[in-house]
Image (cartoon, rainbow, N blue to C red):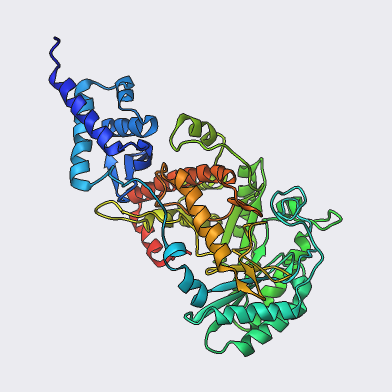
Amino acid sequence: MIARTDNELNILQFKELFYKLKNNNYFGRLGKTFCTEKNLYFLDTGTGKIAKVNENVYKVLKCLLENDNFDSLFDLDISDNDLVGALSDIEDAVEKEHILSAPPLKTLTGDPVLMFDKMLANEVRNITLEVTEKCNLRCNYCIYNPSHPNYREFGHRHMTFETAKKAIDFLDKHSSENKEIYIGFYGGEPLLNFELIKKCIDYGNAKIKDKNVIYSMTTNATLITEDIADFLVENKMVLTISLDGPKSIHNENRVYVNGKGSFDDAEKGLKNLIKAYKKVGEHPSFGFNVVTSGPNYEEKYEKIQEFFKKSDWIPDNISVLSTMVDTGPQEMEYVLPQSKEEKYYTNKINEPLLDWSDRKKQKSSKEQLFSQGDINKGLLRIHKRLLLNEPAQKYGMNGCCVPGQRRILVTVDGELYPCEKVGNVPSLGNVDIGFDIPKIKKFYVEDFINEAKKYCKNCWAVNLCSVCYTNCYDEKGIHYSYRHERCIEERIYLESALARYHSILESNPEKLEKLNKIEII
C-alpha cells in the first residue's frame, strides 16, 4: 500500500468540503471571480460579500466555479503546497465569512408573490397612455417595423377620450396609498394626438385632488411648436426626447416616411422647448434617449460626445441615456453560466458604450461623458447590492415588478400591459373590466417562477439581476428561450460593472459617495 503525503491527504479533505458545498448542485452558482488592472476579487452569491484574493486563491476559485469539478484543480499550473495553501484560505473563509454557502434555489419570491393583491388594489403608480399608433417618422430601428419580431406594426388608430378617462379613473381608484402618481403619453408620436393630451391633463387635474400628478411624454420633438412648448412647460411635463446625437448620425436612422432626415425639425422643436423654459425662468426638465447602430460605434460615440459637449444651445446637466439598436427577442439554447459554452457567446457579445467610456476616462478622468448615466446604472447595482453576514435564504424574482403596479401601458383600445417594452404578451386586463387577477397570477407569477427557477438556480448573478419580463414572453405566454441571450448579456454587464466599481474604489473611492444619493428605479 502506497502511503499518501500530507498534501495529498489535505487535498482529499478539501475535496470532501467541495462536494459538501456543491450539495448536488452546480458549483458555479456560488460566486464569481473578477479582476481589475491592480487586483483579483471574488464575489460571493449568497452574502454579496466581495473579497480581494491572492493569485493562488483566485486560480483555484475560478477553476472550481468554471469547471464544476474538483479534479480540474490538478490541471492548474500550481504547486501542491500552493494549492493546499489556497484551499486552506478558502476553507477558513467558508467557516468565518460564510461564503460559498448560498442555499439551493427552490423557488423565487418577492413583491410579485408576497404583495401582489395589496399593490394592485391600492399602489398602482404609473399609467402610460398609448394616445396614438401613428408616427410621423419611420426610424430604421423602430420596434414597430414589420421586420421586428413580437411587436405590433405601425398603426393608424388614436385613443379616444372615453378610453383615456377610463384609464385615468382606473389609476385614481388603484392608487389610494400613493401620494404621487404618473400619467405618461406614448405612441407612435404622441404629439400627433395633442388635443387628447390636453384633455387628459385637464381631466386628471380636475379628477385627482388627493395626489400629486406628474405628467411625462416620450417624443421625437419634431412637432413641438412654440405653443406646444409653452403648454408642456406650463404643465411641468417630464420629457424624454429621442435624439441620436449630431445631424450626421441622427439622420442615419431617424427619418420621415420619404427617407428625409428629421434632425433639423427635432432641433427646431427642442429650441422652442428651451425658449419656453427660459420664459418662466426654469431649468429644462427633459432628458435625451440616444440609440446607436453599428458597426462603427467608437467613431459615433466620439461624435456624440462632441455634440453634447459643444452644442451651446443644449443646457448643461441634461441627462442622457444611450442604448444600442434592439433587434428583438431571439430564440437560443440555454448554456450554463461560467461554462465553456457561455464563453463562446461572451466573446461575441460586447458593451461598446462602456468599453469606449473606460478608454475615454483613462485619457481624461475629468471629462464629463454623455454616457455617465449608463455607467452609474451599473455602479449603483454593485454599490446597493444585497450585503449580508450570512447567506440570504430566499431569492427574488430578478428585476420583475409586480405586473401592473409600477407601470401599465394602456393601448389605444384600452388593453392593459406590463409596460411599453414587453411587446405582444398576455394582457393584464382592460379599462372596462380592470385587472384580470387570475390571468396575471398565472402568466406573470406562477408560470414565470416555474420556468425561471430552472435556470436561475445555476446563476451567480441571481441576487444582482435586473432582467424583468421583457424578452420572456410572446402573446401565448412565457417563452423562456427568448431570455437566455439576455441573461448572458446581463452577466457580462455585471462582471464589467464589478470591475469598474472596484477600479474606482482602488484609485478614487470618494467618487462612489455620490451613488448614495441616487435611487435604483
Residue at (77, 62) in percent of width and height? 264
Percent position (x, y) of residue 329?
63, 47
Q: Can you give x and y, in whole percent of width and height, for residue 213 in the image?
A: 57, 81
Quarter location, residue 193: bottom right
Q: Quadrant of residue 458?
A: top left
Residue found at the far top of this picture: 1
Nearer to the camera, 342 or 519: 342
Image spot of residue 137 (x, y percent): 79, 60
Question: Could you say which is closer to the camera, residue 403 or residue 265?
Answer: 403
Residue under the image location 52 percent in, 85 percent down: 211
- Position of the N terminus, as image quadrant, is top left
The answer to whether residue 309 is left or right of residue 7 is right
Residue 483 vs 217, above or below: the answer is above
Nearest the eye: 192 or 483: 483
**Who is closer to the viewer here, 205 or 280?**
205
Residue at 39% in and 32% down: 66
On the rendered structure, is 409 left or right of 362?
right
Q: Residue visible at 67% across and 86% down? A: 203
Left or right: where 505 falls relative to 116: left
409 left or right of 55? right
On screen, residue 283 above or below 107:
below
Residue 122 x, y percent position in the rendering: 49, 78
Whether residue 315 is visible to the viewer of this picture, yes or no, is: no
